[in-house]
Image: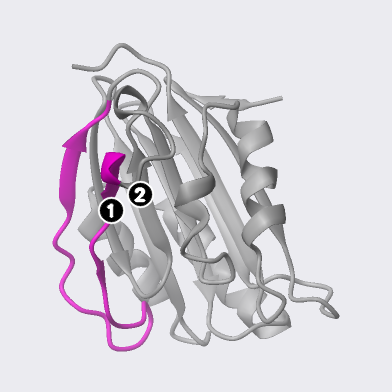
Amino acid sequence: MNARAGALAWAVAGRPLPGQVESGDAALVLDRGGDVLVAVVDGLGHGPEAAAAARAACAALSATKGDLEALFQACHASQRKERGVAMSAALVEPDGNLSWAGVGNVEGLVVRASLGLPQDSGHERLLMRGGVVGGAMPPIRPGGLALRRGDTLVLATDGVGDDAARSCDARPPDLLAPHLLDRHAKETDDALVLVARWMGSGP
């Protein structure tokens, strides 16, 4: 069953690197009242230390109010005793306006329902900036777009092939997320994909 946060229906599918018990990839969806935070973090490397870094980042996100810059700065501070993370995060307003930013290699895209799936021309891609949250983190400069009913936000770690976008379709998030993981997860890394569909009216 799909989870709900505000007007978003969402689901997560993930697995650790084969042979590992813990995954260094983690996801967070949090209804903050005025908006919904959607984030995926990827602890550097894999195994228990990567998992600890991801947990620290998610705890910082959960405890922090404010905009995307404040959220990234809180995660940056949370990594002082950790190995650092890659992260992409989005804030979705009640009217469907979305702002997002990424540091490192967590892919983000919005698949437009109105343009047909799985046409790549129907994707809005997050501009990811090089660096590490907790290391050499660049300035955070969020981008923005307006969601329409049925648009799908996908955040995926680099353990999921970058061709996963072509497998997006209109199935519900709780079916789409494991579908993308099954088809595109790599055997050489932790893998996680978060799918969130805008169910509000939007512009």
Q: Is residue 62 visible?
A: no
| Crowd tier of the residue under label 2, counting other residues whose Cα lies within 10 Å: few below 14, some 14–19, many 20 or above | some
Task: Tell me which residue sits at (59%, 86%) in the image.
Answer: 45
The answer to which of 129 and 51 lies nearer the viewer is 129
Percent across and percent down for residue 146 are 20, 30
For label 2, the residue is 109
For label 1, the residue is 125
Task: Tell me which residue sits at (74%, 76%) in the image.
Answer: 17
Q: Earlier in the sequence, mark 1 or mark 2?
A: 2
Percent across and percent down for residue 124 are 26, 46
Which quadrant, please, contains the C terminus?
Answer: top left
Query: Answer yes or no: do the residues labelled 1 and 2 have beta carbons within 8 Å?
Result: yes
Percent across and percent down for residue 56 are 54, 69
Q: Is residue 186 above or below residue 108?
A: below
Q: Amino acid at mark 2?
A: Leu
Q: Is residue 16 above or below residue 60?
A: below
What span is colored magenta in the figure?
121-147
Give how far apart the Cα atoms at labels 1 and 2 are. Answer: 4 Å
Q: Is residue 137 above or below residue 185?
A: below
Task: Tell me which residue sits at (15%, 73%) in the image.
Answer: 139
| Crowd tier of the residue under label 1, counting other residues whose Cα lies within 10 Å: few below 14, some 14–19, many 20 or above | some
